[in-house]
Amino acid sequence: MSQSIRGILVLLVLGGLGSRASQRVAEGPEPRNYDYFKYHNMSEISGWMEQLEKENQGVVTIINYGYTYEKQGIKLLKIGLASTEKKKAIWMDCGIHAREWISPAFCQYFVRQILDTYKTDEKIGQMLKNMDLYVTPVLNMDGYAHTWFNQSTRLWRKSRSPGNCGDSCMGTDLNRNFDANWGSVGISRNCCSEVYNGARVLSESEAQAVTDFVKARSSEILCFLTIHSYGQLILVPFGHPNITAPNYDELMSVGLAAAKAIKDVHGMDYTVGSSPNVLYPNSGSSRDWARLIGIPLAFTFELRDKGLHGFELPEDQIKPTCEEAYAGVRSIITYAHDKAFHITTPNTAATVIATIWTVLLAVCLTSAPLL
């Protein structure tokens, strides 16, 4: 084969690949062919969301509930089944910190699991009839897109709004910007710091968007979940060392049950506790804000690992991380659902029945000499 013919064939092949790649970015991959065990850029995630809505009409709805600093629409997936009764809800956001790529990967996996199983898993189906799930796959869209720019930006954490220190010190830590003991502990007023809490409370449009959406539905939302990495932790309110949640014992009990569910999957240990006790004090977090406005259950998940890879968790750990985290999240939302709708779990029912039979047997034995 002549060099000229080879050259033409190479150009044709590369041209075809380029065309398909451009189409993938523009339209997003088909969800049924979507690789949930690879990291995806913002364009691919947006395409995935749109395709899910098309393929699950009546179950999945995209809601645009605000805009980032760079004017990207902040979107969530509302997942639920039609009901004539008033429904409750669960909130979950991922990707509030840009560099924590495993977090958006988990939100995508969680949505897939729910949609793949609600018709065959009686419990999931029941929960979707009674509750809507509000899932934001990437909250800090500007920052997340920035981490994909090149290796030098991979570990960017904050938003992309301008600070007061020049272009080299942009951004605010969105998880220090909420109206929850704002600016009191675990923050910096230096806008070059990774924990800079913003010019004022809710200075960031992303934090304001979450506040507006959730606050308007606070009486419906049973549980607020925000997914981070890393550390293998389940954190309960509050981040301030001198403040304790009024239902701290319940939060710890639910968190410990979730940690057990996680451990049962791949044997990984997750530590449960308040941030000052197991991590560090902080203020202005979305978790603490959710509890302060009356949402009874609020948790931060810090996914794998414990520091070996940190924020750059290899793709071969996406699958086990998501599988175990799903078990933990399912444990929590099942508890929230069953408590709200006064449903006795099978284990509880079995315990009650066993107790009744034990009492009856004791009565019979005690009464036997009288018969």
Image (cartoon, helix red, strand yellow):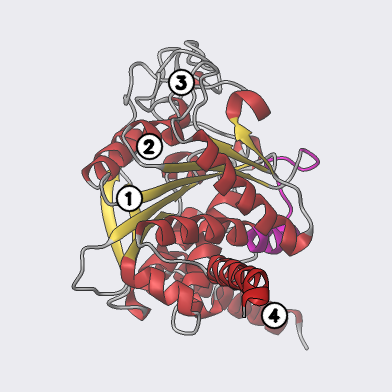
Up-down relation of residue 195 to residue 370 (above or below): above
Could you tell which of marks 3 and 2 lies nearer the N-terminus? 3
Q: In the rendering, which numbered label is found on residue 269?
A: none
Which of the pair 327/31 is nearer the observer? 327
> Residue 49's quadrant in the figure?
bottom left
In the rendered structure, which amino acid carries the disc numbered 2? Ala
Are circles 3 and 1 on residues that touch, CB within 8 Å?
Answer: no
Q: Which residue is mark 1?
A: 221
User: Label 2, label 1: how many angstroms apart (C-alpha)?
Assistant: 10 Å
User: Label 4, label 2: how many angstroms apart (C-alpha)?
Assistant: 65 Å
Q: Position of residue 204 (x, y in %)?
A: 34, 29
Density class for disc 3 (Cα within 10 Å; few <14, some 14-19, many ≥20) is few
Dot 3: element: helix
User: Label 3, label 1: how many angstroms apart (C-alpha)?
Assistant: 39 Å
Q: Residue at x 24, y 39 (%)?
A: 212
Density class for disc 1 (Cα within 10 Å; few <14, some 14-19, many ≥20) is many
Q: What is the quadrant of the N terminus in the image?
A: bottom right
Q: Which residue is mark 4?
A: 4
Q: Residue at x 52, y 25 (%)?
A: 239
- Indicate which label's residue lies in the foreground, 4 or 2: 2
Which of the pair 299/77 is nearer the observer? 299
Up-down relation of residue 186 to residue 136 (above or below): above
Dot 4: element: helix
Q: Residue at x 46, y 30 (%)?
A: 245
Q: Which residue is mark 2?
A: 290
Q: Which residue is mark 3?
A: 167
User: Label 3, label 2: how many angstroms apart (C-alpha)?
Assistant: 32 Å
Q: Magenta span covers which residues?
A: 307-324
Are circles 1 and 4 on residues that touch, CB within 8 Å?
Answer: no
